[in-house]
Amino acid sequence: MTTIDLDTLRSEVRALDYVRGNSAEDTMWREDDEDARANLAIEGIPLTAEDDALFDMLRDERVPPSLATAILLRLLGHPDADPALAITPAGASC
């Protein structure tokens, strides 16, 4: 699996033009994220430490869930990813 450079990704996320979640949204998104992580663990799909760090960073930056999904698709080089999103795919040379 490709390692994600979280410092570079955080810089790219901070450079994006998006509206950060407010305090109430941040609280709700964190609760939803916690539930999702618990559900994955129940299903036998626990996140790695790197996955946890990635999702923690996205929450810390108050990235809305829809943008977080778009970032992940771009990061993973998924065919449905928006090529215009200024996120460097994991494993791409910079």
Image (cartoon, helix red, strand yellow):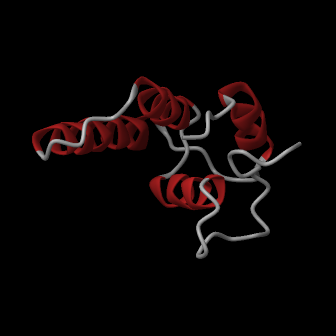
Q: Residue at x 50, y 58 (%)?
A: 69
Q: Residue furthest front?
A: 1
Q: In the image, residue 80 lies at what x, y percent? A: 58, 75
Q: Residue at x 64, y 52 (%)?
A: 75
Q: Quadrant of the C terminus?
A: top right
Q: Nearer the viewer, residue 55 or 25?
A: 55
Q: In the image, residue 46 lies at what x, y percent? A: 26, 35
Q: In the image, residue 29 lies at what x, y percent? A: 36, 43
The answer to whether 2 appears left or right of 28 in the picture is right
Q: Residue furthest bottom?
A: 80
Q: Residue at x 27, y 44 (%)?
A: 32
On screen, residue 57 above or below 77: above
On screen, residue 31 above or below 88: above
Q: Residue furthest right?
A: 94
Q: Nearer the viewer, residue 30 or 78?
A: 78
Q: Quadrant of residue 84?
A: bottom right
Q: Quadrant of the N terminus?
A: top right
Q: Quadrant of residue 44?
A: top left
On screen, residue 44 above or below 87: above
Q: Nearer the viewer, residue 35 or 46?
A: 46
